[in-house]
Amino acid sequence: MSDNSISNAQTDLLEVAGLAKHFAQANGRHTVALADCSFTVAPGKLTVLMGPSGCGKSTLAYLLAGYLEPDAGTVKIGGAPVHGAGPDRMLVFQETALWPWMTVVENVMFGPLARGAMSRAETRDEAESLLARFGLAEFGDRYPQQLSGGMKRRAEIAQALINQPKVLILDEPFRGLDVMTRELMQEYYMQLFEGTHSTTLFITSELEEAIFLADQLLFMSASPGRIIESMEIDLPHPRTFETMETERYLEIKRRATAILNESGAFEVT
């Protein structure tokens, strides 16, 4: 996949307005997951959404990807309302979405082939190009169970990007990785983003991860989830882990910590 094809996503704006979702319980009551949730994801920017456990982050991700329908509110891309799932919005789940009976390259090829978007030869060329870009050129013929946790995450991001989505949604993609692998994946993903600038919503519950990655940081309330604050993160690019030792990073962290403490949504020490 060329840089130019990925950069087309920069022309698209994701707008979420008044989104609400509830779920019926067996006792006849309802759990309100989201209420009046509104925000925008700027074209070509990495927007990070941070919220406490159980606040509706994954529900929001499923709504944006079209796997759930909202009870109220709208989702628009480039000003046009979207309904249902589609290749213009790709979601990378918390848990692995790689099919264990397919090789890594077959997993990456699946989306375009299922839609008939490209020939098999073209799809394989694109998949192999992406895997090389993700440092997985030698692992295309392996099966998912033969990969490390970090390698699976890279393969899953490649699996999403081959569809050339207008918006990429990542739902706590590094959750469950050990500390060292998680830090390596954060730096790797930042390098990847700085080379593509795909319009991205990255969901996390980790403050340090959020600040390191974000161009814009959104804070979500405890359930029912809604956006309570937005911060622009003006840390310079390219970012490496040395960035986290700068005075500007520490200033941003102090401000973000104050927002979290004031909201009461997190227990921050």
Image: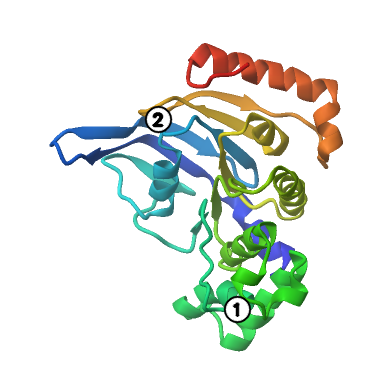
Residue under pointer 1: 103
Sequence-first disc among 1 and 2: 1
In the orientation shown, which residue stands out farthest toward the left?
28
Please tell me whether mark 2 sits on a helix, a strand or a loop: loop
Q: Considering the numbered disc 1 on the image, is that residue within a helix, a strand or a loop?
A: loop
- Pick the residue in front: 210 or 205: 205
Mark 2 crowdedness (10 Å alpha carbons): few <14, some 14-19, many ≥20: many
Is residue 35 in sight in this rendering? yes
Compute the Cα span from label 1 to label 2: 38 Å
Look at mark 2 in the image and give the residue it sits on: 225
Judge whether residue 80 can be spotted in this image.
no
| Residue 236, percent from left and from top | 81, 34
Q: Nearer the viewer, residue 247 or 115?
A: 247
- Horizontal and vertical percent for residue 113? 51, 80
- Residue 99 vs 269, above or below: the answer is below
Q: Residue at x 63, y 33 (%)?
A: 216
> Where, by quadrant of the figure, is residue 54 drawn?
top left
Q: Which mark is residue 123?
A: none
Binning the other alpha carbons within 10 Å of mark 1 as few (below 14), some (14 to 19) or many (20 upward) gives some
**Vertical relation: 87 (above or below) 186:** below
Q: Quadrant location of the N terminus?
A: bottom right
Which quarter of the figure is the C terminus placed in? top right
How is the rendered protein coloured?
A: rainbow
Q: Nearer the viewer, residue 214 or 173?
A: 173
Residue type marked 2: Gly
Q: Residue at x 64, y 82 (%)?
A: 124
| Tag in front: 1 or 2 | 1
Residue 93 horizontal/vertical position (percent):
51, 54
- Residue 194, position as x, y percentages in the image: 76, 49
Q: Is residue 180 left or right of residue 46?
A: right
Identified by mark 1, the residue type is: Thr
